[in-house]
Image: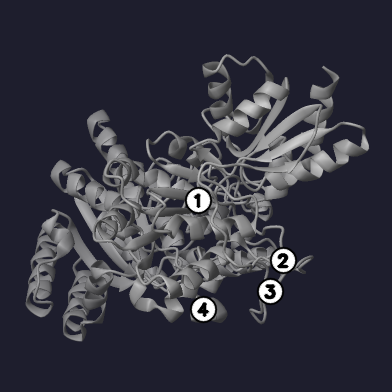
Amino acid sequence: MPSSERLLDKIETPADLRKLDRLDLIKVSDELRRFIIDELSSNPGHLGASLGVVELTVALHYVYNTPYDKIVWDVGHQAYGHKILTGRKAAFRTNRQYGGISGFPRMDESEYDSFGVGHSSTSISAALGMAVAAQRLGEDRKVVAVIGDGSMSGGLAFEGMNNAGNQKADLLVILNDNNISIDQSVGALKEYLLDITTSRTYNKFKDKVWNFLGRHRRGRRAQSLASRIEGSLKGTFLHQSNLFESLNFRYFGPIDGHDILHLTRVLEDLRNIPGPKLLHCKTIKGKGFPQAEQNQTVFHAPGKFDKCTGELIKPEKSSRQPLYQEVFGNTLLELARTNDRIVGITPAMVSGCSLNIMMKEMPDRCFDVGIAEQHAVTFSAGLAVEGMVPFCNVYSSFLQRAYDQVIHDVALQKLKVIFCIDRGGLVGSDGATHHGFFDLSYMRNIPGMTASAPMDEIELRNLMYTAQLENTPGPFSIRYPRGTGVISDWQLPFEEIPVGKARRISEGKDLAILSIGHPGNFAAEAVKKAAEQGISVEHWDMRFVNPIDKETLHHVLRNFKKIITVEDGFIKGGFGSAVLEFAADNDYHPHIERMGIPDYWVAHGTQKELYRECGFDTQGIITAISRLHSI
């Protein structure tokens, strides 16, 4: 079909979509799905989730008067179709690229992005706020929250629903139920939803109700009758009260989330029903691309792939260095084989953090708690109380959601929970919502918290070994970045690392560099190049930001008047600030230049591009060395 004949080419905004005949929506959905597959095959992104909501996206923008009516997307990687239909079709080829559009909804990017998202379980609370505001302002504005990909298991989602049921605001929650987040969904809620959707008796009668509505769907009498019949069926055939109705939501469904014609009719009906409502849609993650349907975890974000065969196009490896997460996963399994008290915990990131390596061999000692970071931390605390050694693996940006639990439930009680903080620092194309800006700052300030960051794979391995030793107190945190390290032969015998002790990488006499974590490799390379220019630099890998190595700091501050600190974290309150505090407290007056993530929200791009933007890549450090040396 020539591109000029595509309906999608005629759609720049949802207003254009609403001019089409309802039957045309089938073709639009097919074209939108193909457009997403074509674009993401060469410009990687989150494929599976967006394919699964194509029909729902088209139906929502067809029925609702966006942007006046508000659609709040949960998580955000469901929203590619939404972006394409709302004026960003031409710009979509820049999705997640440096200087291009974001991979997630952003309020400052489009008036159609009603709320910025990237973390899960936020849509209901945000949408409720909008609905209550519209009610108070006397505006006939409709508000829809689309939640899925396992996000309903997040505690914030239940908090929002609990309040919404009490507020009686005009809110529609759409549960996009595909039974998976990145890995397979877990927990009692998943089983509950499965029970609803697989009850043959219930669904047989439910279909009759919807057929009845199809013939008599106007007026309060039909709505009231439908509500009574639906409630009766659920109670009779599912032998339990409806969870959502117990929170004062009127529950509708489950319905086929890929039947675009039925979806639009149902949404039109629900648009006219006031109060809090929940529409339960069954969808298939990766719908329309067989390989994505069959291997949903891999095709959540598959990288480049052949759009005809589905074959993944793996980038050529320039080295044999493993991913830091793979070092974590393999090392944890190795440690667990020798210490039967070790257990692994993750909030819905089994494959993302490589806990699946241990889970394959020791499934009874690994716990995927679903999208529930707060629970993951306090669950780990409970395990520690009884003498277990929990390795709680959470992405840095997601651990922010459980900061109170880290302080109150773990640190205050001096429990030995080992936090393995993945994706610390700049993460790349996921952008500001996923960068690990703050963990160095927020972990170093907790009394009794050992906060560390390895410079390479061997250091990560030995920090994990040290943390689980009986004589090492807790809590203990180890943060490491997304991506590969620098050492191929990393599986060496374990060595205990003295807690709070730095290591010298190189000696020098002109100035000193103090680094923490992976950027120490950039610093080490810069030191070598500076030596070629006749500048002698002493370099210390500090390893710990708390407790910080006071002996090393005294040595450096006594012997050097020019010091550079380097970190892949927010400069304000981070590692460099800790060095400044120590200097001030001990009456040292050096010239200290801090390098790290500056005081603004860094957007998306490759990690290499973002390191360069923030100025602490190898070239940036060389420039700083030359400038400081010339002063």
Label 2, residues with CA under 10 Å away: few <14, some 14-19, many ≥20: few
Evaluate if marks 3 and 2 touch, with contact meaning CB atoms under 8 Å apart.
no
The secondary structure type at the circle numbered 1 is strand
Q: What is the spatial separation of the Cα atoms under label 3 and label 2, in whole angstroms?
A: 50 Å
Question: Percent position (x, y) of residue 150?
Answer: 36, 63
- Say whether marks 1 and 3 touch (CB < 8 Å): no
Q: Residue at x 46, y 36 (%)?
A: 444
- Could you tell me which secondary element the residue under label 3 belongs to? loop
Please, is residue 56 above or below residue 164 in the view? Answer: below
Give the SS element for disc 2: loop
Residue found at the very far bottom of the displayed protein = 200
Q: Which residue is mark 2?
A: 488
Q: Which residue is mark 3?
A: 1
Q: Tell me the residue that label 1 is attached to.
A: 478
Q: In the depicted view, which residue is nearer to us: 326 or 236?
A: 326
Residue that label 4 marks: 295
> Relative to 352, does residue 599 appear above or below in the rendering?
above
Q: Position of residue 319 (x, y in %)?
A: 77, 66
Q: Earlier in the sequence, mark 4 or mark 2?
A: 4
Looking at marks 3 and 4 on the same chain, the residue that comes earlier in the sequence is marked by: 3
- Residue 43, compared with residue 184, is above or below; it is above
Res. 602 mark? none
Q: As rendered, which of 56 and 109 lies closer to the eye?
A: 109
Residue type at the position of mark 1: Ile
